[in-house]
Image: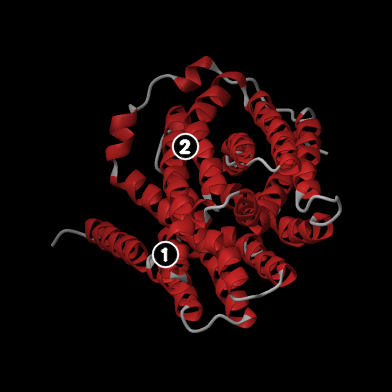
Amino acid sequence: MSRSFLNLLLYFVCQALAASSTSVLVAESALVGAMLTHDPRLATLPVALQQLATLLTTYPASHLMARVGRRAGFSLGALFGLLGGAVTTLAILRGSFALFCGGSFLVGGYSGFATFYRFAAAESAEPEKREHALGWVMSAGVLAAVLGPWLARRTKEAWSTPFAASYALLFGMALLALLCLQLLRVPAPQAASTRGGASVREIARRPSFLIAAAAAMVAGAGMNFVMTATPLAMAKGHHSFDHTAFVIQWHVLAMFAPSFVTGRLISRFGAPQMVLAGLLVSTLCVVVNVSGTSVAHFWTGQFLLGLGWNFAFLGATALLARAHAPQERATAQGLNDCLVFSSIAISSLLAGVVEHAVGWRAVNLAILLPVGAVALAIAAHLRAERASQRPAV
């Protein structure tokens, strides 16, 4: 087995474990928050704090790994997951909302490191195979789509305190990821690779970076906004937890299963076109979600939401990978994910407030404006590129 293939396989496994943890959190976090607090507006505060921690972690994590290497950086992230799983489990057993918020913050630190598995996978492949490697590792989420909600259902009542065993499981999955990471064989980072190149301000002003970051922000925040509110909306509609887990399972499946072919589609049609396709699918999700609140509506809407995220987010990642030089990698990736997870943190916090105040329909309609704005920006960028490539008359 070649070293590059082994690394790619390990990234696949670690991505699957991280995504499985995320799918458990998606199904249960807002419900646990509602169980532990007397104010329903705060039900999604733990989710928001988790995303805030991811936001605060991404930029320093990117630069840390540029200095100490992927293995050491990802291992530190897994340690955050270990501690977060332990603290959230203890919080549920004690009935402490504040402690649960603290544990969720630690879990967010784990996610802040884990988000770079997709970049590490692309870097481990030959330039012409980067989109394929990216798609292959992201397809690990297919396992998460099946495993995460199944584990959530199986462990919800496994202990006398509901949901406690599910969060203890997060500890176990982070531990397994930590063990797998010790098998990584990646070159030590070169000091010169982090020097030179453009500054943060210069990168942030590039149209190519702005387009990629805006697409990723809208894809991530829009998806997270609707997804976070879904368990609350289904509970209000008197749907069972099994139905909620089923809907989330298919949502996560739609997020990651297309990754088997999304990389090839990006190579064939182009990253901007795939982002536009993803935004269109997300718009169809809104149409379905505002049409009814049956299990079938939730299932169809969440499936489309996941599919739209896959096309748009992977397309945005491919755009970013080609928007900077190798020595700018840490800065560009860190800045991008900092922006992405800041928008996701805000969307998590607002999801519970908006759903409680004005309802499920408003949650869905709220994402149409940013989706439309980014779609128009990408279309204008494509027209400008085509115009610049036309021969002068």
Looking at the image, which residue sits at the far top?
A: 191
Q: Which mark is residue 357?
A: 1
Question: Which image quadrant for residue 86?
Answer: top right
Q: x, y percentage for residue 23? A: 67, 55
Q: Is residue 178 above or below residue 305?
A: above
Residue at (72% x, 44% y) in the render: 92
Q: Is residue 385 left or right of residue 333?
A: left
Q: Is residue 120 left or right of residue 273?
A: right
Q: Amino acid at mark 2?
A: Gln
**Towards the viewer: 107 or 236:** 236
Question: Which image quadrant for residue 99?
Answer: top right
Residue at (48% x, 84% y) in the render: 291
Q: Is residue 310 visible?
A: no
Residue at (43% x, 43% y) in the render: 342
Q: Is residue 24 above or below residue 80?
A: below
**Towards the viewer: 124 or 366:** 366
Upstream in the sequence, badge 1 or badge 2?
Answer: 2
Q: x, y percentage for residue 227? A: 55, 62
Looking at the image, which residue sits at the far left?
A: 393
Q: Is residue 113 visible?
A: yes
- Camera-nearest label, 1 or 2: 1
Do the residues bearing badges 1 and 2 touch, measured as CB atoms within 8 Å? Answer: no
Q: Amino acid at mark 1?
A: Ala
Q: Judging from the image, what secondary structure is the residue with disc 1 in?
A: helix
* Alpha carbon distance from label 1 to label 2: 36 Å
Q: Which mark is residue 333?
A: 2
Q: x, y percentage for residue 15? A: 69, 45
Q: Judging from the image, what secondary structure is the residue with disc 2 in?
A: helix
Q: Is residue 267 left or right of residue 335?
A: right
